[in-house]
Image: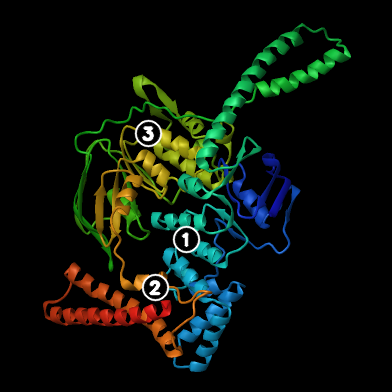
């Protein structure tokens, strides 16, 4: 079933043509990835399909009544709403029923509204939907639904927008970099969700494992032409290589024919016959084909960086906390020459703060950081480049250096480095403010590399970079002879570049794992999971279409309240335990806090026992 058809659309900005006469269709249950270099119009095409921008020519036609949801890079949430209110602003009728039920739960003593809300939940079979929507919010780390949107970070707002789209289940999802701002746990959950759900996707993503495991078709915009591949990322790479090889063969033939025709043109008299004029016209077509060339560059640089001494970087029992949040707890490590360490962990565990501490931007509370005398840091942060109006690309990079020294006395200029990172000579004289977001990130990366560091620290370097640029960056880093310390949620990138990992477990705990990300996941999967009773609530459905509820009205209310009570008690228990771990309890308060902790444990056990009793009855 066809959902949407794109016919001969074109888009340009001034003299710069992004794309011309692009056509394709999107059918039900297709999961399409759209691949192209930064600056070639990926986001423009998404905006046109979503109806928030117009093409210069061509048209978009869609199935009548088609529901489209678009996750863009821009935040469009109302700051004055709570998370819960933002979710319920949807026109989805079942969400309206759930909203009414959630409000009734806040005043359970008022029986009439509760009974009415309960009956509506039954009528619309909303229990499964409620369970799923709560699971989506939980997986994307939204536990406090009363929190206002204005208090969320940029990354949290992007995650909330994603959650709202998933909850509403539109016919067609258009996604622009959906894995940005998600930690690895969230990405793997989203990957699993898309794989099992019957859902139609059209998305831009640089996450190659995500492409491999989710998408069943890939569209590539390359050199202004659209190529379609029915298959996942591995199939796409194979077929693209075959296509390029075929193009190179044809190009070689065209060049030989061009030489032959050029010789004929030079020998012709000025007055030509009709036949020779036709051949002359053909000559110019042959000339165009013969002069085509691909904009692909492989980075192979024997960098002559400043030599690293025996001492690289030493961390001696460093600790850091912000209020109640423990980032580091007496962490120590001695870096060895040439180590490549990736940093992984959930959002909010302090990964970026750790990099700022190492580079001296944030002081430690306790402990010492001792860098070697020969160490020269190159630090790529998430904040990106600061744009100066009227500044050109080449001028930006020359502020940081004119060249990088190579082996055997050679060197690479600022312009040559930009070319290797896909900035053509013409592009180097464009104004920076005209670059796409991905191109600005690429330029920022060049400003770090031109300084010729021997210890590279990269904080999410793969965000907003296209797959072509990622391959260039990876080739550069594989050749890089110094130390690497990288925070990234790009699993493919981590597997290819990193030798070991710092795993941020939260509450100041960091473990060192000797292997790449896939090695770590295999190790984690081999450990039997431990699951508290309350987490089973996600697996025990309140009802299904074919299951008859055995709980009475009063028991149903009790069951709902038990879940809330247990969560509150679990939080209290963690707080009491944390006070003992931190050692911040006054001696005369130890007995009192200890008693409160024991009371919380006893209440949890009693309430979990009752919860299990009711849940078993629910399953009958």
Q: Which residue is mark 2?
A: 537
Between circles 2 and 1, the one closer to the viewer is: 2
Give the SS element for disc 3: helix
| Res. 550 visible in picture | yes
Callout 2 crowding tier (Cα within 10 Å): few <14, some 14–19, many ≥20: some
Q: Eyeballing the image, is 479 above or below 527?
A: above
Of the numbered discs 2 and 3, the one sitting upstream in the chain is: 3
Q: Eyeballing the image, is 315 above or below 257?
A: below
Give the SS element for disc 1: helix
Circles 2, 1 touching at the beta carbon (< 8 Å): no
- Residue drawn at x 51%, y 31% as measured from the top left: 419
- Residue drawn at x 66%, y 51% as measured from the top left: 26
As drawn, which residue projects farthest toward the left? 587
Spatial CA distance of label 1 from label 3 is 32 Å
Image quadrant in which the C terminus is located: bottom left
Left or right of 583, for residue 507: right
Q: Which residue is mark 1?
A: 154
Task: Give how far across and how far down residue 491 sits, in percent.
Answer: 40, 46
Q: Which residue is mark 3?
A: 478
Give the SS element for disc 2: helix
Task: Give how far across and how far down residue 187 sits, in percent.
Answer: 44, 55
Please tell me how many numbered marks the rendered image carries: 3
Circles 2, 3 touching at the beta carbon (< 8 Å): no
- Residue drawn at x 32%, y 72% as measured from the top left: 533
Circles 1, 3 touching at the beta carbon (< 8 Å): no
Spatial CA distance of label 2 from label 1 is 31 Å
């Amino acid at each position: 079933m066809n959902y949407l058809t794109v016919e001969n659309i074109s888009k340009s900005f001034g003299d710069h043509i992004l794309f011309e006469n692009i056509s394709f269709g999107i059918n039900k249950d297709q999961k399409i990835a759209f691949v192209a270099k930064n600056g070639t119009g990926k986001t423009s095409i998404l905006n046109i399909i979503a109806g928030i921008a117009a093409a210069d020519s061509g048209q978009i036609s869609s199935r009548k009544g088609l529901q489209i949801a678009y996750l863009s890079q821009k935040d469009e949430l109302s700051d004055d709403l709570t998370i819960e209110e933002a979710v319920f602003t949807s026109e989805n009728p079942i969400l309206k029923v759930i909203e009414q039920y959630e409000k009734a739960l806040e005043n359970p003593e008022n029986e009439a509204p509760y009974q009415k809300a309960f009956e509506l939940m039954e009528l619309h079979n909303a229990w499964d939907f409620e369970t799923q929507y709560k699971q989506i919010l939980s997986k994307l780390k939204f536990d406090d639904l009363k929190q206002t949107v204005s208090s969320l970070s940029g990354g949290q707002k992007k995650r909330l927008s994603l959650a709202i789209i998933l909850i509403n289940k539109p016919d067609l999802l258009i996604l622009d970099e959906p894995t940005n701002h998600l930690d690895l746990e969230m990405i793997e959950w989203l990957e699993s969700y898309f794989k099992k759900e019957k859902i139609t996707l059209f998305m831009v993503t640089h996450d190659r494992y995500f492409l491999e495991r989710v998408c069943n078709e890939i569209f590539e915009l390359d050199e202004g032409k659209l190529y379609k591949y029915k298959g996942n990322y591995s199939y796409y790479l194979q077929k693209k290589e075959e296509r390029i090889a075929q193009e190179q063969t044809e190009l070689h033939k065209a060049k030989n024919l061009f030489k032959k025709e050029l010789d004929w043109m030079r020998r012709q008299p000025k007055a030509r016959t009709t036949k020779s004029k036709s051949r002359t016209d053909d000559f110019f077509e042959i000339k165009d084909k013969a002069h085509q060339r691909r904009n692909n560059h492989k980075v192979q640089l024997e960098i002559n960086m400043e030599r690293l001494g025996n001492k690289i970087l030493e961390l001696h029992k460093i600790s850091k906390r912000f209020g109640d949040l423990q980032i580091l707890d007496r962490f120590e490590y001695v870096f060895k020459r040439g180590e490549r360490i990736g940093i992984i962990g959930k959002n909010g565990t302090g990964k970026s703060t750790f990099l700022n501490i190492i580079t001296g931007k944030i002081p430690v509370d306790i402990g010492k950081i001792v860098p070697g005398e020969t160490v020269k840091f190159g630090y790529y942060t998430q904040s990106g480049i600061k744009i100066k109006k009227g500044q050109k690309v080449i001028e930006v990079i020359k502020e940081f250096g004119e060249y990088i020294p190579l082996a055997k006395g050679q060197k690479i200029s600022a312009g040559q480095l930009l070319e290797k990172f896909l900035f053509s000579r013409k592009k180097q004289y464009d104004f920076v403010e005209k670059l796409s977001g991905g191109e600005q990130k690429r330029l920022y990366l060049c400003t770090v590399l031109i300084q010729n560091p021997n210890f590279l620290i990269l904080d999410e370097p793969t965000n907003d970079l296209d797959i072509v640029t990622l391959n260039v960056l990876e080739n550069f880093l594989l050749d890089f002879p110094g130390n690497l310390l990288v925070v990234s949620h790009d699993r493919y990138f981590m597997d290819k570049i990193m030798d070991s990992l710092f795993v941020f477990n939260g509450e100041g705990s960091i473990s060192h794992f000797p292997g790449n990300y896939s090695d770590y996941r295999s190790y984690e999967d081999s450990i039997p999971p431990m699951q508290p009773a309350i987490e089973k609530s996600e697996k025990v459905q309140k009802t299904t279409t074919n299951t008859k509820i055995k709980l009475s009205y009063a028991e149903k209310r009790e069951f709902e309240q038990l879940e809330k009570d247990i969560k509150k008690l679990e939080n209290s228990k963690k707080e009491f335990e944390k006070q003992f771990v931190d050692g911040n309890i006054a001696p005369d308060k130890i007995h009192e806090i200890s008693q409160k902790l024991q009371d919380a444990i006893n209440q949890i056990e009693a309430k979990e026992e009752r919860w299990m009793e009711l849940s078993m009855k629910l399953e009958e």
